[in-house]
Image: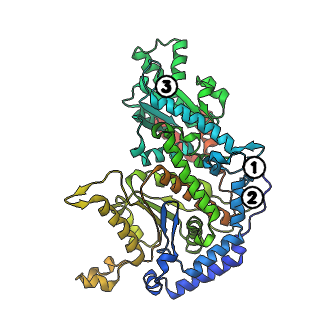
């Protein structure tokens, strides 16, 4: 393991004990956002912040001035700022893998070459060497210079990956569809379930399709299984269309012109039939869930173009700089992470909703599920000792207004309190009116209404004043005091999306530092992979089946009886 100072037990700090007493006092006095707003005309100003071109309103959270002070005290007692600086400078804070954590280097400008030397490497120079190669490749595809085996321009892109090699690019592609100007349709295959591949390949012309295989080691089971199947599909379809004759020579030419890779395993890439010159790598200091702004984002560069991908990187970097250079008390990024700790550890919250009022962000909550839960779902600290408090939250969500007609009932009137982040933009790529009504304003009216309702609720007297029959008054009351953060942007641009992703990356870091955990390994995903390799032969091998537990054996018997 890397030699890093042992984590400070947050629960033993003076600030933690003060926060416990403070929370008990708030509960005893009665948490009342409506009263807190009425008593402090400056509350909104004090709890509103601007970072990059995003605006943050934290005023509807269950905090007072004292809460914010104590949370910042806690951050300093666990040495949040020192660990932040260690991460940015390339120290090996990923202890179980003895690695630096440098996803922030992926978006540092070329002007910073020579300023970050880690393990003997000029990290920024390395990043820009790969970026330049990707930009040149993307321009060849976008311009039509890169052609398939029959000389046709590429019109379809299929990206094959899983986990961090898929969730980020899929989310970003969906979010930035209005900026995809190359006339190239992009599809993503991740699930090993054959249905995923079957649906994604429907209607594709192999002569105009380029496949990107995204696997750092070129060994990921799901990705390589899907890659081999797509390769078979490609060659069979090209032969059926008379594009190739099926000879080894023409098959090899077809693979070379229709497949590229994001990988550092050049020998395996070449064995697959891909020219190593068309393989783009990234580094062991980039975790998969932090890699969308690396070569993993190659599909985005092709469909959006290098200039817009550069804007995407600049959005990340703007939040990195803000997070590093803004005092904690005024740092919206740090405060959002500390607020999550406040709710998890002092209010017992188990989940956190992210509710984008922007349909283009419909995959953003799913992306955050991996980023947050794979990072902070840990039961030991970075020195191997047991955690001393609850860690992690279940992140979930759907775009508004769809969610309003699904799960908001629980948010408003359920017995559990779910902190929620609401995200919206003042402008839309697709303005519309309905009978003179600006539809986007109607949409944003819902965005504002929900946070107001969650914060301030509705009393029995207010319900009665509407003429509601007494017997149903209780059912129509809203307690309020449900915490929300509002994140408002100008427009969902590549820059803004980069900002949002970096925001949550650093929220994860803040929480992980307080909890004393290594947010950058993911050993929890390994056991299931190992067992799957052991179990798969048991579908047909009685000896392998007999080695399984009774439940697994019974389920295998069900499969054998029903598989047609």
Q: Earlier in the sequence, mark 3 or mark 1?
A: 1
394 relative to 412, above or below: above
Check whether the beta carbons of the residues at disc 2 and disc 1 lie within 8 A of each other: no
**Residue 197 x/y as whole percent:** 45, 34
The answer to which image quadrant residue 460 occupies is bottom left
Question: How many numbered callouts?
Answer: 3
Camera-nearest residue between 274 and 28: 274
Q: Which residue is mark 1?
A: 98
366 relative to 70, above or below: above
Left/right placement of residue 251 relative to residue 448 reads: right
The answer to which image quadrant residue 10 occupies is bottom right
Label 1 element class: loop
**Residue 167 x/y as whole percent:** 51, 46
Dot 1 surroundings within 10 Å: few (below 14), some, or many (20 or more)?
some
The answer to which image quadrant residue 64 occupies is bottom right
Left/right placement of residue 109 relative to residue 385 reads: left
**Residue 491 x/y as whole percent:** 41, 56
Q: Residues under labels 2 and 1: Cα distance? A: 13 Å
The reply to whether residue 275 is in sight is: yes
**Residue 205 x/y as whole percent:** 39, 25
Q: Which residue is mark 3?
A: 146
Q: Which residue is mark 2?
A: 384
Camera-nearest residue between 231 and 86: 86
Label 2 element class: loop
């Amino acid at each position: 393991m890397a030699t890093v100072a042992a984590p400070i037990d947050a629960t033993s700090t003076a600030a933690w004990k003060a926060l416990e007493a403070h929370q008990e006092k708030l509960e005893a006095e009665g948490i009342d956002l409506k009263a807190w707003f009425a008593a402090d005309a400056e509350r909104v100003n004090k709890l509103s912040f601007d970072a990059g071109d995003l605006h943050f309103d934290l005023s509807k959270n269950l905090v007072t001035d004292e809460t914010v002070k104590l949370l910042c005290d806690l951050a300093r007692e666990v040495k949040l700022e020192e660990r932040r600086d260690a991460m940015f400078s390339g120290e090996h804070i990923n202890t179980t893998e003895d690695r630096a954590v440098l996803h922030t280097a992926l978006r540092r400008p070329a002007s910073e070459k020579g300023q970050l030397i880690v393990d003997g490497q000029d990290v920024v120079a390395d990043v820009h060497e790969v970026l330049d190669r990707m930009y040149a490749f993307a321009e060849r595809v976008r311009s039509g210079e890169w052609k398939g085996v029959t000389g046709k321009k590429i019109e379809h892109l299929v990206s094959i990956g899983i986990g961090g090699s898929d969730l980020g690019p899929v989310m970003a592609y969906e979010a930035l569809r209005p900026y995809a100007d190359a006339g190239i349709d992009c599809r993503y295959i991740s699930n090993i379930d054959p249905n995923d591949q079957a649906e994604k390949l429907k209607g594709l012309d192999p002569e105009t399709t380029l496949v990107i295989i995204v696997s750092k080691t070129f060994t990921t089971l799901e990705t390589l299984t899907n890659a081999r199947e797509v390769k078979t599909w490609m060659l069979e379809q090209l032969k059926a269309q008379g594009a190739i004759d099926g000879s080894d020579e023409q098959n090899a030419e077809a693979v070379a012109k229709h497949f590229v890779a994001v990988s550092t395993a050049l020998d395996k890439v070449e064995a697959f039939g891909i020219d190593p010159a068309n393989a783009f790598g990234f580094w062991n200091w980039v975790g998969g869930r932090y890699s969308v702004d690396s070569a993993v984002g190659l599909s985005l560069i092709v469909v959006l173009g290098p200039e817009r991908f550069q804007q995407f990187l600049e959005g990340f970097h703007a939040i990195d700089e803000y997070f590093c250079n803004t005092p904690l008390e005024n740092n919206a990024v740090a405060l959002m992470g500390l607020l999550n700790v406040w709710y998890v550890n002092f209010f017992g919250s188990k989940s956190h909703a992210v509710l984008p009022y922007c349909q283009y962000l419909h995959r953003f909550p799913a992306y955050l599920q991996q980023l947050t839960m794979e990072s902070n779902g840990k039961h030991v600290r970075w020195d191997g000792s047991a955690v001393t408090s609850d860690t992690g939250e279940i992140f979930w969500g759907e775009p508004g207004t769809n969610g309003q007609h699904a799960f908001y009932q629980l948010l408003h009137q359920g017995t559990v309190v779910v902190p929620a982040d609401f995200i919206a933009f003042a402008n839309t790529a697709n303005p519309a009116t309905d009978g003179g009504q600006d539809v986007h304003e109607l949409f944003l009216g819902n965005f504002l209404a929900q946070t107001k309702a969650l914060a301030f609720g509705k009393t029995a007297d207010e319900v009665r004043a509407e003429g509601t029959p007494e017997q149903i008054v209780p059912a129509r009351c809203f307690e309020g005091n449900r915490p929300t953060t509002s994140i408002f942007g100008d427009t969902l641009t590549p820059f803004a999306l980069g900002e949002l992703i970096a925001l949550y990356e650093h929220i994860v870091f803040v929480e992980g530092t307080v909890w004393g955990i290594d947010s950058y390994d993911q050993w929890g995903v390994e056991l299931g992979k190992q067992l799957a390799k052991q179990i798969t032969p048991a579908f047909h091998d009685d000896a392998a089946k007999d080695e399984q537990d009774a439940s697994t054996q019974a389920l295998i018997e069900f499969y054998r009886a029903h598989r047609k």
